[in-house]
Amino acid sequence: MTVTATTTTAPPAERVLMEGSEALARAAIAAGCRFFAGYPMTPFTEVLEHCARLLPEAGGVCINAESELEAVGMAWGALSTGARAATGSTGQGLSLMQESFSEITLAELPLVIFNMARGQQDYFQATRGGGHGDYRHIVLAPQDVREGVEHVQLAFHLADKWRNPVLVYGDYLLAHTQEAISIEPMAFPELPKKDWAVDGSQTGSGQSRGVTPLGVAKTGQPAMGQEGKAQYIATKIPLMEREVRFEQGFCDDAETIVVAFGSPAKFVKYAINELRDAGHRIGYLRPITIWPFPYAALAEVAAGPNVKRIGSFELSAGQLVEDVRIGVAGRAPVTYIGGVSTDQSGFGVGRLLDVEAITDRILALHEDRELPPIPGYEQFSYQLQEHQK
Amino acid sequence: MTIIDTSSAPTVPARKVESLKPDLLLTQEHHMCPGCGEPLAVRQFLECIEELDVAARTIAVAGIGCYTSFAGTMDVDLVQALHGRAPSVATGVKRMLPDSLVFTLQGDGDMVNEGLQEVLHTAARGEKVTCILLNNGVFGETGGHMTATSVIGQRTKNTLDGRDAEYHGYPILIGDLIAQLQGASYVARGSVHNAGSVARTRKMFKRAFESQLRGEGFTFVEVLTMCPTGWFVPTADGPDYMQETLGEVHIMGELKVDGRVRTTDELHAENVAKQREVDEQLARGGIEK
């Protein structure tokens, strides 16, 4: 199934130059988000700032929560009334929210999470979840602001469609890049009325409702129990896998295929375009959803007639590469060609977010050479200690 | 709530009332231990909601503890929150539905241990919700362990020789803390260990809800409840034990009304004076009306 992220209608009439964080906030409002709560942390702060200004104008509420715990709790309450609501942070702040993420998923609340990550070291957190129990979140990873605007709107739709949280994996680059864009509300198929939401109107009627992760029900109404609830969620997970989205390029005759996601994928695509022009048979596969991961699509391209090697480019110590290995399943050797790439402030825009450095690594993989070192990082290499030998 | 017409003679003979349950309970049955004070407290606030005629716009947010089982038996639109997080969830509900009556139901472990900052920030923000604390000074559900409100000397499963201030620290008087916050409009501490206290607590619930409905600010009602199981005392001893332990530290009364804050010491002095007056009247032959 080849699905691209582009589901918008006609090209926008008027474009304005806008910073990514403002564009994401405006996209959320265009999607009907009326509640937002967050705790400042760069580069999520910028999204929160724009929501604080824009949401009240749109008749909504934005609360500068006292911690990430409060932020996610407030969103939980707003969602329970049937409103479209969102929260977010960086990976660090999302670590604090994990308990709620687990239980919100069990309560089947359509939370949208803005993960303005500091780089790509939160891939496992986003795709595996750091919370307890069996759950998955749909994770959209936009490559740029224009796609981010679409992904935010798609996130609200998918969250309601599946009654499951959806996370948008952004980063510093997405928050701060200015692009000429237009934010038009996207059209999606109609969804069922939220008759599960609480508004107080059924209190005292004998038919009151409960929004709960516990599998309990009101006296006299059928209850799943914890056992049934766990089974119910477990069987929903594989059904959500049909939301897989990806993009591929130059794979048909490729000898080398590089997998990358998010902002760095745009750099990778640029590099591969240049390398193609220079005659190198290199292709790419970009997961647009990192959960569900496009395993089947990767397996298909990895089985291509000329494929000799697969590379995983990511700005982490090697997280995406594990999904790449699962997808490739031994059809070709898989090499991690990414690297930790943070900066002095820890915002995740380090030395490897550079098209020349990326080109060097892809070409080294393609020519079966050793990967070039990341300049300046040698001094930080961990050396085996005496007692560890 | 049924209102009995007393303007004319009854048309049917007197009969035994089959059920004493409030209309906002789906069943009279509950899962609490014998001697537990929580059902008494739940009944009081449910009947207040009926009296105020605001049931059809009332939403509850339940924390995690023994009382969580009332989430299923209360005929109230309800959101189940995580341990400690109910005040934030209630914030989200109320902000989306400003005309509703929103209350949380939490215990001392939930509110004062796990979620202390949640309730304090919600109060400081002046969120127009009512947080209800059922305070029995122990984790009842886990089997009787110390909480942040356990009093000095109180024996629990992990303070076998009694809570020692040097080793375990001091109890938090949560009502007193909240009363200090500008966003709080009404703060009271009641109990359910005797009929008089139940009646006073009922008035507190009503005043808190009325203040919320008038949009005055954050409202808070703490209720001291018996937990003979978690205290390891005979069921019938629960009320007296409560009065002698928790009741001596977490002093009952209205801690904040119309912006005026009263400290625990002031409440204590008032309560002592009242008791002295009652004792004197009794010595003279009976309570004066």
Image (cartoon, grey):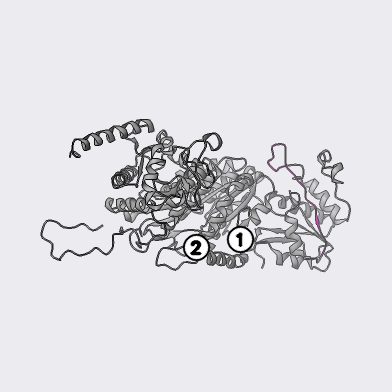
Identify the main secondary structure in magenta.
loop
Q: How many marks?
A: 2
| Magenta-tinted stretch | A332-349
Q: Is residue B170 left or right of residue B235?
A: right
- C-alpha distance separating marks 2 and 1: 14 Å
At label 1, the amino acid type is Asp
- For image coordinates 74% across by 64% down, the residue present is A327
Query: Looking at the rendered structure, which numbered label has been put on residue B163?
Result: none
Q: Is residue A36 above or below residue A251?
A: above
Q: Is residue B190 left or right of residue A71?
A: left
User: How many residues crowd mark 2 within 10 Å: few (<14), some (14–19), many (20+)?
Assistant: some
- For image coordinates 84% across by 57% down, the residue present is A280
Write down the residue under mark 2.
A215
User: Could you tell me if the residues under marks 2 and 1 are in contact, i.e. CB atoms within 8 Å?
Assistant: no
- Residue nearest the viewer, comparing A147 with A337: A337
Q: Secondary structure at mark 2?
A: loop
Chain letter, disc 2 residue: A
Q: Is residue A83 left or right of residue A302?
A: left
Chain letter, disc 1 residue: A
Query: Residue B222, can we see it?
Result: no
Q: Residue A168 placed where, x, y %?
A: 61, 52
At label 2, the amino acid type is Gly
Q: Residue B284 placed where, x, y %?
A: 19, 35
Q: Quadrant of residue B180?
A: top left
Q: Earlier in the sequence, mark 2 or mark 1?
A: 1
- For image coordinates 52% across by 45% down, the residue present is B114
Query: Looking at the rendered structure, which numbered label has been put on residue A134?
Result: 1
